[in-house]
Image (cartoon, rainbow, N blue to C red):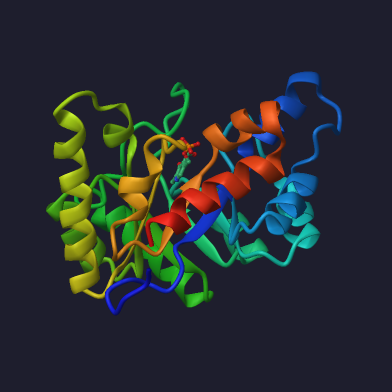
Amino acid sequence: MANVLTPARLRLGVNIDHVATIRNARGGEHPDPARAAQIVAQAGGDGITVHLREDRRHIRDEDLERVASATGLPINLEMAATEEMLDIALRHRPHAACIVPERREERTTEGGLDAAGQHNRLAPIVARLSDAGIRVSLFIAPEPRQIEAAIKLSAPVVEFHTGEYAHAEGEQVAVELRRIVDMAALAAKNGIEPHAGHGLTYENVQPIAAIPQLAELNIGHYLIGEAIFCGLETSVRRMRQLMDEVR
Ligand code: PXP
């Protein structure tokens, strides 16, 4: 149930990258990420998240336009802090841009952005995206120094990397959850909207969804994986329901 501390609805951004991963395995047009975006909209998703990687291993440049015009949902473009990605973001003008660290050899986004250590590199990129009306988010570890860096960079949003929480076992789960709880409160206290994502599943989403200051979760791999068994509409609806149960 919503209260004064709780944003009315916790938004669900669905990352559809891995629809493109499957498509790319055979090189054709199927399955189409634009069709996935339409299904996400029907199923109650609030946004579409895509990560245009340097190596284009899943979403490609032409997908951005197609996905955006397939649905009225806001697009959240995950991007590395490079000139190439900045140019693309400024051309496509997504609703939001989430700056992520990117290493060519990694399987997925491993760890958060070192916003604290890269202030000078990030500052012009955050400023140019913001000047273009794009809502900038920084994908960071739930640590006070990264929030301080986000404040210095005037980023309106941070997304907490929930990978450590998702992969924790035993007593460590509560420790990792506590870090996110505390950092969501710290971000909100400083006027920054906190989001969270990475490694979230039906089993581990509810303690995160219950954090009152969080405004958005971005979830991809698990939802697309579940869609193989039950369909994308069902997997998104189930996640939506689990999130709503704890708000
Ligand atoms: N948020 C960000 C910034 C990410 O980079 C990713 C992974 O691409 C996700 C959320 C979604 O993570 P997952 O695919 O594990 O649900």
Name the residue nearer the viewer: 78 or 198. Answer: 198
Residue 14 in view (yes/no): yes
- Nearer-the-camera pick, 74 or 228: 228
Residue 43 horizontal side relative to residue 167, left or right: right
Q: Is residue 62 above or below residue 12?
A: above
Query: Which residue is painted at 80% across and 58% down in the image?
Result: 70
Residue at x 52% of width, y 76% of height:
133
Residue at figure coordinates x 19%, y 64% from the top left: 185
Left or right, residue 246 beside residue 58: left
Residue at 54% from the left image edge and 54% from the top image edge: 13
Residue at the farthest bottom position:
4
Percent coordinates x, y for residue 198 in the rendering: 41, 39
Query: Visible in this render: residue 125?
Result: no
Residue 26: % across, % down:
80, 20
Picture quadrant of residue 48: bottom right
Q: Position of residue 153 (x, y in %)?
A: 27, 66
The answer to whether residue 17 is above or below residue 34 is: above
Query: Left of 1 or right of it: where is 64?
Result: right
Question: With respect to residue 7, does 222 lie above or below?
Answer: above
Please identify the quadrant where the N terminus is shown.
bottom left
Q: Looking at the image, how many numbered discs can be counted on the residues?
A: 0
Based on the displayed image, in which of its 4 quarters is residue 195 positioned?
bottom left
Q: Position of residue 196 (x, y in %)?
A: 37, 51
**Residue 159 lies in what quarter of the image?**
bottom left
